[in-house]
Amino acid sequence: MQWRRWFGRGRQRRDDRDHDIEREIRAHLELEAEEQRDRGMPAEEARYAAQRTFGNQALVGEDLRALWGTPALDALIQDLRYAVRTIRRSPGFAAIAIGSSALGIGACSIIFAIVNAAVFKPLPVDDPGRLMSVSESDRRTGETGNELSYLDFEDLRHARSFEAVAASDPLVPAAIGGGDDPQRHWGAIVTANYFKVVRPAFAVGRPFDAARDDKPGEPPVVVLSYRLWQRLFGGDPSVVGRPITLNKRPVTVIGVTAPAFRGTDVGIVPEFWIPFSMIDEIEARQGPVTRNRERYWLRVVGRLRPNIDAAAARAELEVFARTLNASFGRGAERGFAIERAGQLDPRLRNGVLVLFSVALGITVLVLLTACVNVANLLLGRASVRRQEIATRMALGASRARLVRQLVTESLLLAMGGGLAGWLLALYVCSFLGLVKTPLGWPLDLSVSVDYRVLLFSIGLAGLTAMAFGLVPALRATKLNLIADVKASALGAGTRDRFGLRTGLVVTQVAICAVLLLGMGLFLRSLHATDTIDLGLRKDNLLLLAFDPSLDRRDDTQARQLLRTVLDRAETVSGVESATLTTAVPLTFIINNTDFVADEHANDARAPSIRTDIYSVGPRFFETMGIRFVAGDDFNPGRSPRPDVAIVNDAFAHAAFGGSSPLGRHVLGNGRNLEIVGLVATAKSRTIGEAPRPAIYLPILQEYTAGQSARGITLIAKTRPCPGPACVAPAGSESDAGVASVAALREAIRSADRSLAIFDIRTMESHVRDALLVPRLARTLSAVAGGTGLVIATIGVYGVVSFAVARRRRELGVRLAIGARPQQVLAMVLRQGLTLVLIGSALGVLAAVGLAPLTASLLYGVAPIDPLTFVGVPLLLLAVATLACVVPARTAARVDPVDVLRTE
Amino acid sequence: MRTGESTRLSLLQGTLDMLILRTLRARAAHGHEIAKHIQRTTDEVLQVEHGSLYPALHRLEKKGLLTSRWETPKSGSREFKYYRLTAAGRKQLAREGSKWKQLTDAIARVMWPAEEN
């Protein structure tokens, strides 16, 4: 080991030096003594005389050593060696200190890593500081981050603040790979100058040709992401110039971006980029998107001119917005917002902020308890080491030197903790990329733990060491020398009883109480979600998605395809019923629009009902287990009536009050729909939501491309499994599912071989993914609460047993003059538990104050849940009692004779 | 040591360095020899506490004005650490010496103006 040799060399050098100094002084003394003897002095006396003439030998030696020891390095090495030795002497202490600070620092580092990835890390492009994102803002609500229309973007090209602006739609699905087994991937359609504006590095090939690739009719080209290039072609550079199949047509690969480039929108990672010359890929599904000024779909980035700053650009865009609003008869509410590109979508920021504040709050609390524990342990040790420290001071060590020594020790511990914490962050963050959302969008939550995070961890460790090592160090060295050297052998007095350590333990218990209360709430909430009636079947459902709009099919062909798929799926053996839907319930985001009852259409006060829209196949409700209340399901056998809909109870209630909706009409989405059926209300977007109005339209009659960018999901109800042997693990295609999944895939693919099938899962795993947020909150809070409890228990135990150790004499006297052991036991317990009670009370109060913050993350549990708020303090008290009993029993067993004899 | 208190002068700050350098000008010497030499040549007026000599020696060595080596003197059997002037040490001695001369001359002119004239 390098460091050991380095350490060793310093030590060797110093040992030589010490030896040399000692030898020189000895030679001097011997010679002087000889001379005195020669003058006739007795040997003994001569030696003393020599020493007298010499002066203070030890001091001279010390001076010489101090002179030679290269102070900074040698002293540091010395301190470190001493610290390592001290720490190694008490490995238990070290493990607790390092372990608890690792947990605290690790938790904070994870949060920092996420913030770092979302906020601090610039886009991996050339000169990222000048790359701005331009979005539309609503002056009334202050909302920014909205997409622009193509025509607005065209106008924006004239803005003089920018060298150039480029537009993109980063959520374009496509079936790539061709042949017999295409895969669905998400990519972006971009203006051909996109790469010229953004300037990412390319692994191979070239970006789009800005002059040509915007024009329809140019030969189609594609730029691949590094990841897709690796996956499809194993990183073969000769793929440049070759065609691949994209939505059934040959497209030439012209380049591959560098691995670091993940698009310009945080979280959305395109796998490929196609130029605007291929706009028909979009328009086939969404109609003429480039000629409609009211169609907002583009994200815009612009590169500032060298001498223009963001404020100047903002001013220009302000004027711009006014002109646009005036010339197109818009209200004054539309504006443009401009900010550094590559930041989190402003529309998501608030939600993310809440989640992160809670997470950060929890992690900081964990860090605090951990630090308090370390500080407490250090204080405890400082008291134990009183004698050592007093002796060293008596021998002439300066206070600064000792403080430095003690701080070095805590710094070493904290650095260990910081490093372990960073590793923890590294480990946990490697899982973030695997988090699945039920959205079906290419969300990438992976977070890289880079050098900034390491610096953060180390910095935090240094800070905690300073904050929590310095106070104990200063206290430890503020000694009454005489008293301590004499008294320490007997155990000093009890003046520390209500001092700093007690305060720290109370704080610790309070923090622990807050953490445990949080854990209790989230656990109860998650438990509540298990018992929430979804209004849906969860078991025996298989989900497979495909997208008939990808191959630029017309709607008639697409409807025919859906019919074929459905027919074939229903004949698959083991399938009891099958259906189709544009949206699977519990998907967070579902297309929606405002409806109003036809009879109230002219009433300005009539409520417009925000309604989730599902286009579903026949037997959807039967398959999904949604209860049919009245009316008829869509029937494929009968000739379809146009403009019919089925609504849920929540919708009927909102539109028609208590009366039956059947046969009545509603207006919305530019249509007049007759209600033919009524179903029970099922959960639509999230598990915790209040009953949400929903309307169901017949997909086989009305499917149009662009109804769902996430494709169509085939849902099949399979026959219940006869035994436990065939319970398939979540999302896997094994066991029970396997026969059906393969057959269902075949049912879809036999209808058209070019269809890409994706998002194959069971309803159970889909529901589990839908519980992402509460599950994350639960995991985080459970880890934090458990850690906090362990840390606080150690803290309480430490303080109480330390107090007992110091009061041995007093306890001995009490026992000697007639106190019964039980009384001593009770006394110690009482004192320990008083701390815990005060701490818990403070914790509960703090938690009540914090409760409103957590309300939005809880399902089916009040933020001040009585069971939690009673149960948690009791649990804490029980654990703390255990922590106190051990030292209390030691106290009761103190042998008075033994104690008094040592006096 | 046997001389009376009043006739002993403690060394001015910094002068010890100069005396050491001066002592070593002629030849190398070990610590004990240097101490004895200073005592002897000043008629025991200047009392050097032997111990205080070593920090000065080591400081000078660290500054590069002296070098040291363990050697056995011709007469004895024991090894001693001998100090020698370096070139830098010689230069330093010349500089310090002339400075000291100026200083004492100046002080003498103030203290005993009559004698000067």
Image (cartoon, rainbow, N blue to C red):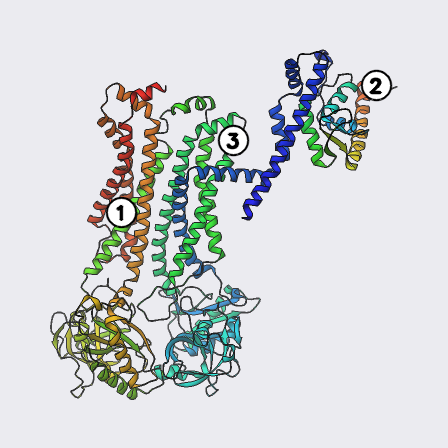
Residue at image coords 26%, 38%: A882
- Could you classify mark 3 by the number of other residues whose Cα lies within 10 Å: few (under 14), some (14-19), or many (20 or more)? some
Query: Residue B13 location, x and y as percent?
Result: 70, 26
Q: Amino acid at mark 3?
A: Arg
- Label at residue A399: 3
Residue at image coords 20%, 81%: A570
Vertical placement of residue A336 versus A211, above or below: above
Vertical placement of residue B79 versus A750, above or below: above
Residue extending furthest front?
B77
Q: CA distance from mark 3 to mark 1?
A: 45 Å
Asked whether the viewer can see residue A321, the reply is yes
The residue identified by callout 1 is: A848
The residue identified by callout 2 is: B113
Quadrant in the picture for residue A678 = bottom left
Quadrant in the picture for residue A487 = top left
Vertical placement of residue A694 versus A118, above or below: below
Q: CA distance from mark 2 to mark 1?
A: 90 Å
